Amino acid sequence: MIGGLAATLALGLASPVAAQTEGAPEVEAEADAAPMTKGEKRLAKLLEGRVAGEPVSCIRTQRTAQMQTIDRTAYVYGRGHTIYVQRTDAPEQIDDSDTLVINRFTSGELCRVDNATTFDPFSGIFTGVVFFDDFVPYTRVKTDAPGEG
């Protein structure tokens, strides 16, 4: 009887502690999550209605391809159905006022192994080196018409 009472008391004492800590990792993760930067908000808006695909090491480029520089966040290539996001290995150093100059190893493609440097467009002064990561494709999701499916 005493053993059963001790087990019941131990269980009763442990339950509130377990209940208090069950959601703790989620609460800590939310507290640690920094608010979105201006660049992250701009990128999120560009990616609305799109789904990420498997990262690729090279993308095809065309003279008409559009590139956007999102300050301290990413470079975005392409337009239309699929766009490619290049966050680089140091996205905090991406400056939308710099000019990106790319020395390609292959024609018609932009690859993670290509050399890229940045320059101040007004003074022409070298401002940094860019090391690319894989390019992540984001494809527009087809939406069903209202009342279907």
Image (cartoon, helix red, strand yellow):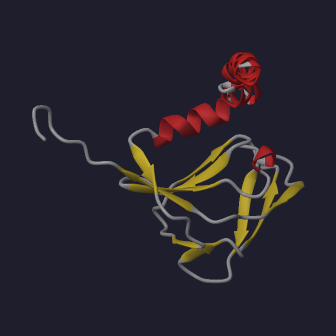
Name which residue lies at 65% across and 25% down: 23
Q: Nearer the viewer, residue 146 or 6?
A: 6
* Residue occupying the point 55% across, 65% down: 55
Q: Residue furthest bottom?
A: 106
Please say if 6 is above or below 38: above
101 on left or right of 52: right
Which residue is drawn at the image coordinates 32% and 48% (left, top)?
141
Closest to the observer, 2 or 20 = 2
At which x and y percent is residue 78?
Answer: 48, 57
The residue at 37%/53% (across/down) is 80
Residue 30: percent from the left, percent from the top? 68, 26
Residue 49 position, x and y percent, is: 38, 41
147 above or below 86? above
Where is residue 9, by image quadrant? top right
**Residue 96: where, in percent of width, then height?**
71, 43
Q: Determine whether 15 is above or below 149 in the image.
A: above
Residue farthest along the front direction in this orientation:
1
Quadrant where the C terminus sits is: top left
